[in-house]
Amino acid sequence: MDHPQIKNFALIGAGGYVAPKHMKAIRDVGGNLVSALDPADSVGILDSYSYNVDFFTEFERFDRHAEKLRRLGDEKRIHYVSICSPNYLHDAHIRFALRIGADAICEKPLVLNPWNLDVLEEMEQETGKKVYCILQLRLHPTLIALKQKIDALPSGRKHTVDLSYITSRGRWYFTSWKGNPEKSGGIASNIGIHFFDMLMWIFGPAQHKEVHYSSPRRMAGYIELEKARVRWYLSVDSADLPPSAIEQDKPAYRSITIDGEELEFSGGFTDLHTQSYQNILDGNGFGIKEAKPSINLVSELRNAVPVPRENGTVHPLLRKKM
């Protein structure tokens, strides 16, 4: 009996916050992490997964190594490049993956600017390789059940949705690339894109959008989707935490209410990256087509001029600050 070939993975951004989830997923699906890149060398966590990972701090040497492996044949070459680098580098690192004959597995946002997707789609055609995006909320059992429930309802109904996401960040955040809108895309891209993708997946495409407030620390606005009217509020300022979070010493607060009813999905996240990887290996991962709507939306929100607020569309947390 033929045994399936073990797939070789390379990881870009090994020292980043989300990298351990990708390392775990690679191990869980039986993959072989062969090389990793990060300009910072605080990557001792690699030893938790393997002692045999070739590590580079310079892209040029990493590139040369990947090209050498490609020429050694299919068993040695890199089959997948997992990309956990800063948002503004995703586009270049995806193109690197395709050029060395590998599929790309990239964290959100896939790119910062929608027009970059057109070139990536062309490169997919040219190389025969695929670009996959980690959209793990689409795999959450509670959210799948909600989508099925909404899909089963008669069309034409608009639900009322409030999205509140506050995740405290210290001063380091604004010194790092994450605090630079040109590198991170700002709050909407960096912490909001997960939720915008999930809401459009469940409630349909955006028909109207407006920004009511925008600063480096927080953004708020209103989006009308095919099946929902959404008031949203995003913040990295701990001063925005509600008393309930402060009392429980929680640094983050996440709330989604639908027609006044709280959607509880705080659990069930443990293996969603592993499930994402398994789907990709099975040929069922989320690609450019699935990632495009949320990238278009956050790009428009990032570049929008805040408009006067009408009471019905203003998020309750923003109304308190007015």
Image (spheres, grey):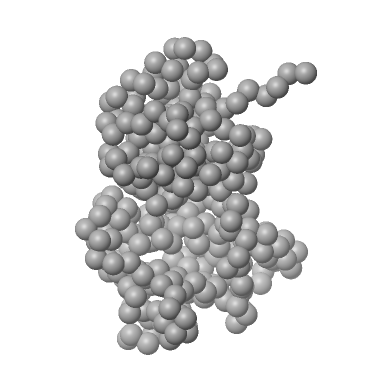
Q: Which quadrant does the N terminus fall into? A: top right
Residue 266 in view here: yes
Residue 288 rendering spot, x and y as whole percentages: 51, 41
Foreground pick, 273 / 89: 273
Q: Percent x, y for residue 233?
A: 42, 73
Q: Quadrant of residue 5?
A: top right
Q: How many marks?
A: 0
Residue 188 spot, x, y in % from top left = 38, 61
Q: Residue at x 50, y 62 (%)?
A: 195
Which sits in the foreground, 226 or 117? Answer: 117
Residue located at (42% from left, 40% from top)? 46
Q: Residue furthest left?
A: 175
Left or right: residue 307 versus residue 117 is left
Extreme-top residue of the structure = 72
Q: Residue at x 43, y 71 (%)?
A: 252
From where the camera sits, is residue 287 visible? no
Q: Residue furthest right?
A: 1
> Is 123 displayed left or right of 261 in the figure?
left
* Viewer-closest of 295 and 165: 165
Residue 217 as seen in the image, left or right of residue 312: left
**Nearer the observer, 151 or 84:** 84
Above or below, comparing residue 66 to residue 252 in the picture = above
Quarter of the image where the C terminus is located: bottom left
Q: Is residue 216 above or below residue 287?
A: below
Q: Is residue 63 above or below residue 236?
A: above
Q: What is the x, y in percent for residue 208?
A: 47, 65
Q: Residue at x 44, y 50 (%)?
A: 18
Residue 58, above or below 206:
above
